[in-house]
Amino acid sequence: MDKKVPVLQALLQQKMLPLYFHKSINISVGVLQALYKGGIRVVEYTSRGEAALENFKQLKKLVDQSMPGMLLGIGTIKTAEQAKAYVTADADFIVCPTINPEVGVVAKGAGLLWIPGCMTPTEIANAEGAGAELVKIFPGNILGPGYISAVKELFPGLMLMPTGGVEVKKENLEAWFDSGVVAVGMGSKLITKQAMEAEDYEDIAQAAEAALQLVQEVTANAQKEL
């Protein structure tokens, strides 16, 4: 089954991609449930620890059982072997911190959206040449919205999504979307380490709902101004 188009459409509609990892399966489950409660329907779980693959499998079971409409992808994928393992685990999409065309080949073969990570114009061009339609600009806090504005015209058919340091603040989000991005990745600024460690899932749910509303408000205003 080709998931690429529906996943891309869902992400472009949500306009933000929450991402997180925790070694505890219980906390991983709690966070995902909180995000779902907050209205989030596209989430990136990151492969950043030994427990990641087994946790992901459990999360996918939970999604299938009790979270209709939720799309769960995997991030921090650097090798084709990792990609294949998560394809087998039924990942809905694959996100990378770097460009590895071999990962793109695995994703394409599985009918999945591949989102490689780029920093320089050369990397962006290489990602586009390898078949990427949406590129993660990372680290966003180092590059900034001005960088997007400077390179966007060089890649007119490519969609860009900054990740890293994107803040849940109106001014910050306006700057990013005004620069031409189609979505923003949100990690620790949205799902804080403190909230996870305290297992404060209500706080995470409320933060997700507020961020979702703010992103929709900012992008709606941007459309009106066009």
Image (cartoon, grey):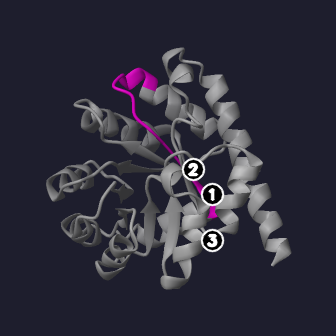
Q: Residue at x 26, y 38 (%)?
A: 53
- The residue indicated by pointer 3 is 180
The answer to whether 98 appears left or right of 134 in the picture is left
Magenta residues (range)? 13-27
Tell me, for residue 41, which label it has, or none.
2
Counting residues from the N terminus, which is met first, the one under dot 1 or under dot 2? Answer: 1
Counting residues from the N terminus, which is met first, the one under dot 3 or under dot 1? Answer: 1
Q: Quadrant of the N terminus?
A: bottom left
Amino acid type of the residue that numbered disc 1 sits on in the rendered structure: Gln
**From the viewer's perspective, is residue 100 above or below residue 201?**
below
**From the viewer's perspective, is residue 178 above or below residue 69?**
below
Q: Residues within 10 Å of mark 3 (few under 14, many from 20)?
A: some
The answer to whether 184 appears left or right of 85 in the picture is right
Amino acid type of the residue that numbered disc 3 sits on in the rendered structure: Gly
**From the viewer's perspective, is residue 220 above or below residue 217?**
below
How much space separates mark 1 and mark 2, taking CA atoms?
Answer: 8 Å
Query: Residue 175: x percent and y percent?
Result: 69, 59
- The residue indicated by pointer 1 is 14
How much space separates mark 3 and mark 1, taking CA atoms?
Answer: 16 Å
In the rendered picture of this protein, how many numbered marks are placed on residues?
3
Q: Residues within 10 Å of mark 2 (few under 14, many from 20)?
A: many
How much space separates mark 2 and mark 3, taking CA atoms?
Answer: 23 Å
